[in-house]
Image (tube, grey):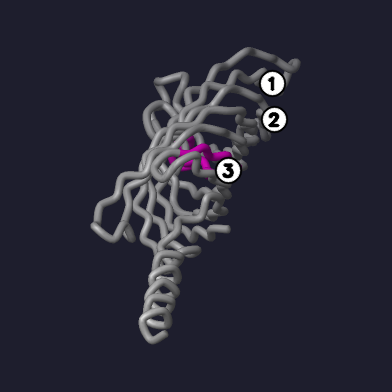
Amino acid sequence: MKKILLLSLISFVCFNANSQTVTQKSSIGITIGPSFPLGDFGSKDLGNSESGLAKVGGFLAIDYSYKFSKYFGAIVSAQGRMYSVDEKALAAYGVPDGTGASLSITTSAWKMGAIMAGVFQVVPLTKDEKLNLEIRALGGYQSTSSPKLDVKISIPGMGSFQDSQESESSGSFAYLVGAGLKYSLSPAVALKLSGDYNGAQPKFSVTTYPADAPVTQQVRQSIGAFNVGVGLVIGF
């Protein structure tokens, strides 16, 4: 009888100990952090027609992940990003010296929302697998809104002149590749540090309003950004 009770106790303890290390198949994660514009999107070169003049912005991502096996799975991600425009770079156009003229420039921000899906791989970094490297690649749809631009020039004796460029929205394919470190606090809760590259090339119909008549032209904007985020993951 003692042996039976002892074996039952050992089995019960082992079962519960093992159950604490079971990895949840599904999880929801939220990540937030700065987003750094790269390439033409972050360029401040006014001589480059594709310069986005974007400053460092921010992003928010909500992810749903499902593991097919211990180390591989699928992921769906909804993301939002925003970048202000470098108005000082635009002001470099300037006005002629000695004229007493003044230049005023105001802009709104670049805004993006995306829904993407893809796959990920988990690479354990410690023997107990509490610390893991997660590599992922996603693709999907992104809606991008260009900034609104208002320019006003005042020249003594001649009056004021103004021009504006309306904000336009465009949908395009977008992709994301990146990696992150995930540290498990418990079988169902983990902390995450990630770095991802986002890319897209939306095409806009940009309309300006000079003094005579509206002018519309097609413009393609290359958008690249690197997101650095911290977040929380909850498994279920």
Amino acid bearing label 2? Glu
Residue that carries the numbered disc 3 in the rendered image: 79
Q: Which residues are magenta?
A: 73-92
Q: CA distance from mark 2 to mark 3?
A: 24 Å
Location of residue 146 by image quarter: top right
Residue placed most toward the observer, 3 or 53: 3
Q: Is residue 50 above or below residue 89?
A: above
Q: Local crowd at mark 3 within 10 Å, few (<14), some, or many (≥20)?
A: some
Query: Residue under circle 2?
Result: 166
Residue 117 position, x and y percent, is: 56, 33
Q: Does residue 116 sit above or below 19 in this rendering?
A: above
Q: For the residue marked with disc 1, what is the amino acid?
A: Thr
Of residues 170 and 4, the one drawn nearer to the viewer in this rendering:
4
Name the residue rendered at 68%, 28% in the picture.
168
Query: Marks 1 and 2: CB-CB under 8 Å?
Result: yes
**How many angstroms separate mark 1 from mark 2 (CA)?**
6 Å
Q: Residue at x 50, y 34 (%)?
A: 99
- Residue at image x 54%, y 44%? 66
Pointer 1 local density, CA inside 10 Å: few below 14, some 14–19, many at least 20: some
What secondary structure is found at the residue carrying circle 2?
A: loop
Give yes or no for residue 82 being in the magenta stretch: yes
Residue 145 at what x, y percent from top left? 64, 33
* Nearest to N terminus: mark 1 or mark 2: 2
Image coordinates for residue 9, horizontal then vertical, percent: 41, 79
Q: Residue tagged by mark 1?
A: 207
